[in-house]
Image (cartoon, grey):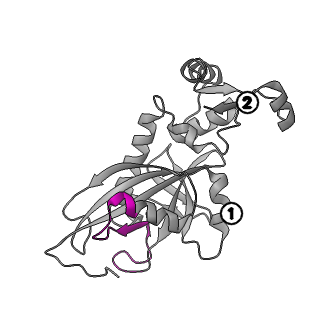
Amino acid sequence: MHEKLDTNQLYITVDLLILTVKEEHLNILLSKRTQSPYAHLWALPGRFVEINESAETTAKRLMDELFPLKDVYMEQLYTFTEVNRDPRGRVISVTYLVIVPFVQLKQLLMEEGTICHCFEIQLKEDFQLIGEDGTKLIGSDLAFDHSRIIETGIARLQGKIDYTEIGFRFLNNPMCFSLGELQSIYEAILGKPEDGSNFRRFIRKRYEETRRILPLDREERKRRGRPAVLYRLT
């Protein structure tokens, strides 16, 4: 399907940039293409927008088919309109940034027939992705302009983490988390260590003093068997 396109027609696709934090590293989900162009290369999950759908509807439908989860965080990232981005014809991509806590993905990724696989994003050096089997990918190893889409999404994420609650979306349990867990997420996204004292001061001033996060009471902490101060997102 869609191996050949009408060169006189404009097509619109959606591509999903699905991110998660696994073992304190930022990961992205990719699938291997089975058809030309770029057969056998890794790519972002994507789909053509149907004539009776909005791009958002297509994105949500694709996400539901890949991972039937509730309340998934999704925001429109950017629209890529370069003329020659698809060798088949004129194709515009509306991309969506999707964040899923790894605890929700872990079992689904092990199910038979899953087409998506986790790749760790290396942020300290040149753009590189490392698969669970040790496969290493650089930008030119990906289909279409998907390396540019990934870099755009990471830059958006890093730019928003200090002034929005987007980092909290990676928490496995936003109703019970420690500042240490949250710090590990910030470090995974930014690709560098954070000073613990400065990080806690920043979080408490921006979120606890404004009551956007609240500490759990001692009895609740005791029931959960966790001595550290735990918080919930309000």
Q: State how far apart marks 1 and 2 are (Cα).
A: 26 Å
Q: Position of residue 233 (x, y in %)?
A: 62, 33
185 vs 124, nearest the viewer? 185
Instruction: Give the numbered dot on residue 230.
Output: 2
- Secondary structure mostly taken by the magenta-highlighted segment of the chain: loop
- Residue at image coords 31%, 81%: 3
Residue hosting label 1: 107
Residue 87 occupies quadrant: bottom left
Residue 101, placed above or below residue 49: above
Left or right side of 151 for 71: right
> Magenta segment: does it hold 105?
no
Say what secondary structure mark 2 lies in. Answer: loop
Q: Position of residue 192 (x, y in %)?
A: 55, 35
- Residue at image coords 41%, 35%: 159
Residue segment shown in magenta:
35-58
- Residue at image coords 70%, 32%: 178
Which image quarter is the N terminus in? bottom left
Q: Position of residue 194 (x, y in %)?
A: 59, 29
Q: Where is residue 97 in the image (x, y as percent from the top left)?
A: 43, 51
